Image (cartoon, grey):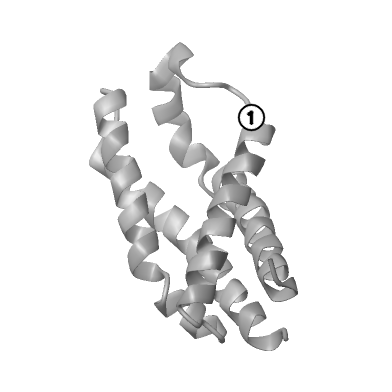
Amino acid sequence: MTKKMLFAWLAGFLIFFFFGWFVYEIVLKSFYADFMAQLGDCIVKEPPVLAIIIAHLCFSLFLAQWLLKSNANTFFEGISKSIFIVVLILVWYESWLFTIFPQMNFTIAFVDVLANSTITIVGAGLMGFILGKMK
C-alpha cells in the first residue's frame, strides 16, 4: 500500500466517522427518533462504536482503492468517479432494509440515501484530492 493510498484511506475514514456522526447524531437525530422508537428492541439504543469504526475502515479502503484505480486526482474527480457506485450501493443497502424491518418507509430510505451519499461523496472528494496531491 502506497503512502498516498494510506493517507486517502485514513482521510476517508475520518470524514465518514466524524461527518457521519455530525449528520446522524446531531442534524438528523430528531428525524430518526420516531422511526427508531417503532423498532423497539430490534435496534441497539447506543451506536456500537467498534462496529462503526470497522464499517468505515472497510468502506473507505474500498473507496480509496476504487478512486486510485479510477485515477481520481482532484476533489471533483473523487466525487464524479464515485457518485454512481456510492448511490448504487446505498440504494441496494436501503432496499434490503425493507426486507428486514416492516416499519421501513420510503421517506426514511430517501433521507438515509441522501445523507449517506452526502457524507460519502465529501469523503470521496477529499480522497481524490489527496490521491492527486501526494507522490
Of residues 78 and 116, the one drawn nearer to the viewer in this rendering: 78
In the image, residue 123 lies at what x, y percent? 57, 66
Residue ID at (65%, 56%): 13
Q: Position of residue 128 (x, y in %)?
A: 57, 78
Say what amino acid the circle numbered 1 marks: Pro
Rendered-image quadrant of the C terminus:
bottom right
In percent of width and height, residue 16 lies at: 60, 55
Q: Quadrant of residue 95?
A: top left
Q: Is residue 6 above or below residue 131?
A: above
Q: Which residue is mark 1?
A: 48
Q: Is residue 87 above or below residue 2?
A: above
Q: Quadrant of the N terminus?
A: bottom right
- For the residue carrying disc 1, how many other residues have a C-alpha within 10 Å: few (<14), some (14-19), or many (20+)? few
Q: How many marks?
A: 1
Q: Nearer the viewer, residue 6 or 107?
A: 6
Q: Is residue 62 left or right of residue 100?
A: right
